[in-house]
């Protein structure tokens, strides 16, 4: 199905390019502007690299690096110059692009935001990371849910970010809303390598969904990101994998959303996304359609609580140098309220 990394594109195929971007250091507005130019140039490289490519994907932290700096001077706006440059790059190169920004949030901490822009420069998807990688990341929890869009060749596409992919509920929500391709961008470093690999495969198989996953790559002198671009087919098999960890390498493959649709309709054994809501349909007509999961009921009721809740030792970001928060979710800062 790979079509030699997209070189031989089928009529129904969607060719993806995952950029294992060199990890930058961004401390000033000048650094931010320079890194914006790097990304724009890489969009051009992607197009020159493979004329059949439909969508080029940049990792989380592609623009800001891994400093976790919340300095407002280097935070971005959706209508700011960085996003404008990405939009123009997609127009100039006639390609869809997936980008990462840290978004200024006057009501609280910045959002970790992912954008998908089409080949006419329109923002088609705007996602804010639902599960920041605590206690390391300071970002505001996302408040836009998980949007699903129609992308190249009519493929249904969702985007999640890094730690999001460690929660099976995230991939399940993408699939439940119709996603045939789930993009997962990340800045993960080497200790997460094995977890990254098996969750990317599990997220695909459990939901009959292609997953396209990529991290930052290389070192900024402090952190070493691992690259690990992975495109995984809906049966859990790896189609393409950037195992060498070479910075700025673009991992490519053709995927077939039409075969995802076919599997979701025709599979019996292991059609898990359907069978979750139709348990034991051999025994009872239509299967059991109740919700037997206590944690789901408790989440909805706002009473989610682990049996070992009182023993959990890390419950804020103080171990990573962040002050303990006092603002509740949904509350704005005093400055914003004024």
Image (spheres, rainbow, N blue to C red):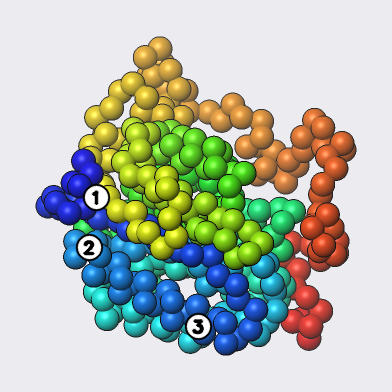
Which x, y percent locates residue 154?
Answer: 24, 57
Q: CA distance from mark 3 to mark 2?
A: 25 Å
Snapshot quadrant of residue 260: top left
Quadrant in which the N terminus is drawn:
top left
Which x, y percent locates residue 133?
Answer: 66, 53
Give the labeled residue for mark 3.
Answer: 34
Looking at the picture, tell me which residue is in the foreground, 156 or 33: 33
State if disc 1 and disc 2 touch (CB < 8 Å).
yes
The vertical placement of 223 against 109, above or below, is above
Local packing at callout 3 (Cα closer than 10 Å; few below 14, some 14-19, many 20+) is some
Which x, y percent locates residue 287?
Answer: 42, 22
Which residue does the image show at 25% across and 65% down from the upper left? Answer: 49
Q: CA distance from mark 2 to mark 1?
A: 9 Å
Which residue does the image show at 57% across and 82% down from the upper left? Answer: 31
Give the labeled residue for mark 1.
Answer: 5
Local SS, label 2: loop
Which x, y percent locates residue 218?
Answer: 52, 59
Would residue 263 appear left or right of 109 to someone viewing this image?
left
The vertical placement of 130 against 83, above or below, is above
Local SS, label 1: helix
């Amino acid at each position: 199905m790979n079509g030699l990394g997209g070189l031989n594109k089928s009529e129904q195929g969607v060719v993806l390019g995952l950029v294992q971007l060199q990890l930058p250091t961004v401390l000033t507005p000048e650094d931010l502007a320079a890194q914006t130019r790097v990304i724009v140039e890489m969009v051009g490289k992607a197009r020159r690299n493979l004329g059949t490519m439909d969508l080029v994907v940049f990792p989380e932290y592609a623009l800001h690096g891994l400093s976790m700096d919340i300095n407002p001077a280097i935070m971005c706006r959706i209508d700011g110059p960085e996003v404008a440059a990405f939009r123009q790059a997609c127009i100039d190169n006639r390609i869809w692009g997936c980008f990462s920004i840290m978004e200024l949030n006057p009501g609280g901490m910045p959002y970790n935001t992912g954008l998908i822009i089409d080949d006419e420069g329109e923002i088609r998807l705007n996602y804010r990371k639902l599960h920041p990688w605590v206690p390391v990341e300071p970002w505001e929890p996302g408040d836009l849910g998980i949007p699903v869009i129609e992308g190249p060749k009519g493929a249904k596409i969702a985007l999640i970010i890094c730690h999001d992919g460690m929660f099976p509920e995230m991939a399940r929500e993408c699939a439940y809303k119709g996603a045939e391709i789930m993009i997962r961008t990340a800045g993960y470093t080497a200790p997460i390598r094995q977890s990254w690999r098996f969750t990317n495969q599990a997220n695909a198989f459990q939901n009959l969904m292609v997953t396209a996953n990529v991290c930052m790559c290389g070192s900024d002198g402090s952190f070493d990101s691992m690259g690990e671009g992975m495109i995984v087919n809906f049966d859990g098999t790896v189609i393409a994998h950037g195992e060498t960890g070479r910075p700025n390498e673009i991992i490519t493959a053709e995927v077939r959303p039409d075969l995802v649709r076919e599997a979701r309709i025709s599979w019996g054994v292991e059609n898990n996304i359907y069978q979750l809501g139709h348990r034991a349909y051999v025994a009872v007509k239509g299967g059991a359609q109740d919700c037997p999961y206590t944690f789901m009921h408790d989440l909805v009721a706002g009473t989610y609580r682990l049996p070992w809740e009182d023993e959990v030792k890390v419950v804020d970001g103080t171990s990573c140098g962040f002050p303990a928060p006092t603002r509740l979710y949904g509350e704005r800062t005093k400055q914003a309220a004024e």
